[in-house]
Image: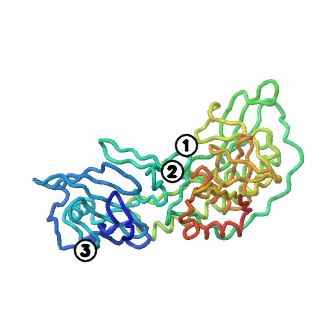
Amino acid sequence: MTNQVMVAGKPISQFYKLPFEKNTRILRLNVLESNTEHRAGNRPYYLVKRKPISFKKGVLTIRVKLENEPLVKVYLKVEYDHLLVSCSVDTDESYLGRYAYRTLRAMLWNEFHDFDEYYWPECFNEVTGRSKYLDVICDRYGVDIKLKKMFKGFFRPNDYFLDVLERSVLKRGEALNGLTKLKNENGIGYCLANTDSLRFHSNHYPFLIPYTFSTNADNRTVKSYKSFLFENNDFHESDLTSNQLNLNKICYQMKKIAKIQFVEYGDNEERSDEIASMNLDKKRKIFELFNKALPMLTQEPFTHYLFTYGMRNIQKRPMKMCMQVATFSMDIPSLSFLLTDKGDYYELKLRFRVNGKALLFCEDQIARFFICSSSKPNVWYLLESEMDSEVVLFFSEKNFRIQVPKGYYKEHFEAYVDEIRKHYELEVK
């Protein structure tokens, strides 16, 4: 007698298969109802009491009670392109029982349900039933599934991965000699203004903004900040060097185009595409301006970094407690990947090199086109390609490392690694 595959203590033959919408984990109502003659009436979710009670080896167990009927259990297992469903009463591979149908119908109250949160292939030990990747919490509120902190970058089949396409490198100017010298205790400095462009406040791309200040007696540190400089400021240009005059022009250009525009409620698809195109053009222009400004910026002795929390917070005067001393380097960072065999999974890690030395990212110091190392978080390096900035932004959301179980690495992830290899250094261990 052949051994049957068991799922939640039941042979797989007792599970009914329902196909998902292509390339998703979405089950549609029309698919469900085409697989059974059962129907639930006009208000199918009111008469079904259901509570998820466990998630073991990828199987979600739901306790279900229909009106005036005893408790039963319904089992759901999410596979790559289909849902397996069974119950403790009558469902098998050829028949979708009433309890299983009513449970799913209640979940599809909006005529569809996305089961992606329950799709965790190759994550559970078949002997112990435990997962090294997941924290599964079962309490009176139901089942909560979260990735463990060290596996924030865990990759599942069909998860989004950045397309590493054309990598266009901007030619960088030569470093200028010497630093600008202060004429007196008052001077002008430059601030890299940055915020989180993924959140909805008065968002903006990073840009440079000049400010005026007075120094302490040593003429090396700032005593107080006087004001930010805007294009319409009444400021004596005779007090500025030619380097500062040219740098200011670039700063004013940046600020004009730095604000990110978002799609508003009611915008149609054509308007959404138009906004996306406008933002892309702004981003490219600002990157080009940073590349032009960098040699001039490295000449200035007073440079800072400011996390703005939005354009609206850039008022007349900088707040001293928020201004971080920063140094801008002419060294060009190059991205470097490390692919490591971790036993039952592979890990793809992003680092960068400066003058051949491998450095780790400072995770709290990412400013779209600029990066810092964990060893020197106040030294900023300008990336040489817009594609590099997209790669860094993508990996920064995953703690700069992605884990892929070996069970599906070759089929679902190896092609991404091959594409990375075409554009960047890839070391394999």
Residue most extreme to the left = 68
* Residue type (three-letter) at the residue carrying disc 2: Tyr
**Image coords of residue 54 (percent x, y):** 34, 49
Left or right: residue 34 versus residue 77 is left
Q: Does residue 252 lie above or below 282 as drawn?
A: above
Provide the residue designation for mark 3.
35
Locate residue 347: give its quadrant.
Answer: bottom right
* Residue type (three-letter) at the residue carrying disc 1: Tyr
Q: Of callouts 3 and 2, which one flags the residue occurring earlier in the amino acid sequence?
A: 3
Q: Residue at x 41, y 64 (%)?
A: 267
Q: Residue at x 68, y 36 (%)?
A: 324
- Number of numbered discs: 3
Give residue 309's mark: 1
Q: Marks 1 and 2, Cα distance to the nearest angstrom?
A: 33 Å
Q: Does residue 194 lie above or below 253 as drawn?
A: above
Q: Marks 3 and 1, Cα distance to the nearest angstrom?
A: 51 Å
Provide the residue designation for mark 2.
133
* Residue type (three-letter) at the residue carrying disc 3: Asn
Whether residue 85 can be seen here? yes
Whether residue 199 can be seen here? no
Q: Residue at x 32, y 70 (%)?
A: 18
Quadrant that contains the C terminus:
bottom right
Left or right: residue 99 versus residue 279 is left
